[in-house]
Image (spheres, rainbow, N blue to C red):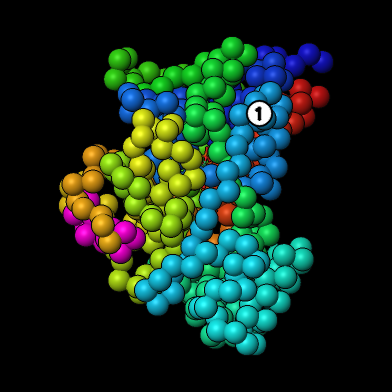
Amino acid sequence: MTIQNQNIAIIGAGIGGLSAAYDLIQAGKTVTIYEAADHVGGLAAGFKEPHWDWTVERFYHHWFASDQYMLGLIDKLGWSDKVLFPRPVTVMYHQGKFYPFDSIPAALIYPGLGWGINKIRFGLVGLFLRMTKNWQALEKTTVDTWMRKWAGDKVYESMWEPMMIGKFGEEFAKTVNMAWLWARLHARTTRLGTFEGGFQTFADKFAERLRQMGVSIYLNTRIQSIQSTKSSKLELMISSPSQPTETKTFDQVLATTSPALLARLAPGLPENYLKGLLSLKSMGAVVMTFSLKHKLSTEGYYWYNIPKNAGFPFLSLVEHTNFLSPDYFGGDHLVYVGDYLPQDHENFDLSQEEIAQKFIPHFHKFNPNFKPDWVKKTWLSRTKYAQPVPLVNHSKNIPEIKTPLHGLYFASMSQVYPWDRGTNFAVEIGRRAAKLMLNEKMLDSK
Ligand SMILES: Cc1cc2nc3c(=O)[nH]c(=O)nc-3n(C[C@H](O)[C@H](O)[C@H](O)COP(=O)(O)OP(=O)(O)OC[C@H]3O[C@@H](n4cnc5c(N)ncnc54)[C@H](O)[C@@H]3O)c2cc1C
């Protein structure tokens, strides 16, 4: 039986939506992407000043050498020669000073753990987590409980607890399951990579390739609702500033929004599925990018991890131009200051100027010569959906990609578990969703 040419809509031109489109168009479908923003790339998008050659991400981004789905896709697209892996230095805070912490020798001389048994326990626990594949056993308990038992209170409190509080706040730090930490240690490398020109250049090139393959991409176009029709199709209400609101009907729709937004867009989903979407927890992120006249980190460090109790109003300071040369940015020195925050935190309401004034007085701690007039410009990026929070036995809470509403599929950061969110896993889940969509149509046509 011949398969009819199906008409598919994708909501969101982030890396997940673009990756799904890549497989769906190759399978001969008609594919339309609707994107609310004026650019593609989603959370991995970037921006550029006129005098810069490269873009910089709104939220700091890099790839790991183990990002097989992303690097595999780039290879397929023929752009592997555009992936760079510089060797920046990540540092950890200990009693007023920062120490490199991105290799085994660096960890061995890091003073935060003392010199005796704690360092050995830290090493053994790290080794076990790198070796074991049984994350299912680990999701039954929290990081807090597991680490206190196996690494000990001292190791946990000096190494892992600050990270947990930094990432998940006091509210969730003690409740996140151990599979989350396992996945981070398992899937991450100290080698950090990027794309020539920045992530936005990658996303733009990818979108351009998709357009050449026949995908239609509408920017500045927001989906307001998703409804089933009597003929088991899906009707989207579509709005854009240049057009009156219209409705269009599709055979299948893939949503790549946050779970909470999907619940609002598709209230016709069965109650159980809606409840599941709304029960998922996540943290937001607030990141300010500064362009400076001079280099901030005198040691040339890239990533500063800062515990919440060290008296800084942020979790990390990232000097992007200690990862990539300032020459790509017209000689500007780019520094991110960021934090993961609960969605009702004041930083979501303060003005850009107020947030800059909170952060700038701390810059002299990274360089005693710093003067506020080094700041040339700031950019503020905020998202309330930045980091899913996986609680104990989280695998039972993951919404199915194929939703119970006929033809509606959902692929988001909240479903890549046990892996932590990342563009690598956005590629994986986008392509997995495409495969399921194609399978459904094949079954229907039999
Ligand atoms: C602070 C921070 C740091 C990160 N660091 C890294 C990193 O170092 N490395 C890494 O690989 N990943 C990192 N990530 C994660 C990475 O950005 C995400 O995992 C990935 O971009 C998610 O892609 P996505 O396509 O699933 O979703 P998104 O990128 O969120 O894309 C969804 C898209 O849908 C659009 N949309 C939403 N609602 C509608 C609507 N109603 N109509 C039309 N369009 C709509 C949105 O505008 C968006 O473009 C980071 C994320 C954050 C927040």
Residue at the image point whose x is 42% and y is 26% from the top: 53
Magenta stretch contains residue 358 = yes
Magenta stretch contains residue 64 = no
- The foreground one among 116 and 126 is 116
From the image, give the main secondary structure of the stretch colored magenta.
helix
From this view, report whether residue 91 is shown above or below residue 433. below
| x and y, in percent, of residue 314 in the image | 33, 61
Residue at the image point whose x is 41% and y is 52% from the top: 318
Instruction: Tell whether 354 sits left or right of 286.
Output: left
| x and y, in percent, of residue 433 in the image | 65, 36
Residue at the image point whose x is 72% and y is 70% from the top: 127
- The foreground one among 271 and 43 is 43
The quadrant in which residue 104 appears is bottom right
| x and y, in percent, of residue 415 in the image | 59, 49
The quadrant in which residue 305 appears is bottom left
Crowding around mark 1 (Cα neighbors within 10 Å: few <14, some 14 to 19, many 20+) is few
Residue at the image point whose x is 62% and y is 62% from the top: 103
| x and y, in percent, of residue 282 in the image | 45, 56
- Amino acid at dot 1: Asp
From this view, report whether residue 431 is shown above or below residue 214. below
Residue 86 visible to the viewer: yes
Q: In this picture, which residue range is highlighted in magenta?
A: 356-367
Q: Quadrant of the N terminus?
A: top right
Residue behind label 1 places its C-beta within 8 angstroms of ligand 1: no
Residue 434 visible to the viewer: no
Label 1: which residue? 81
Instruction: Tell whether 159 sits left or right of 2.
Output: left
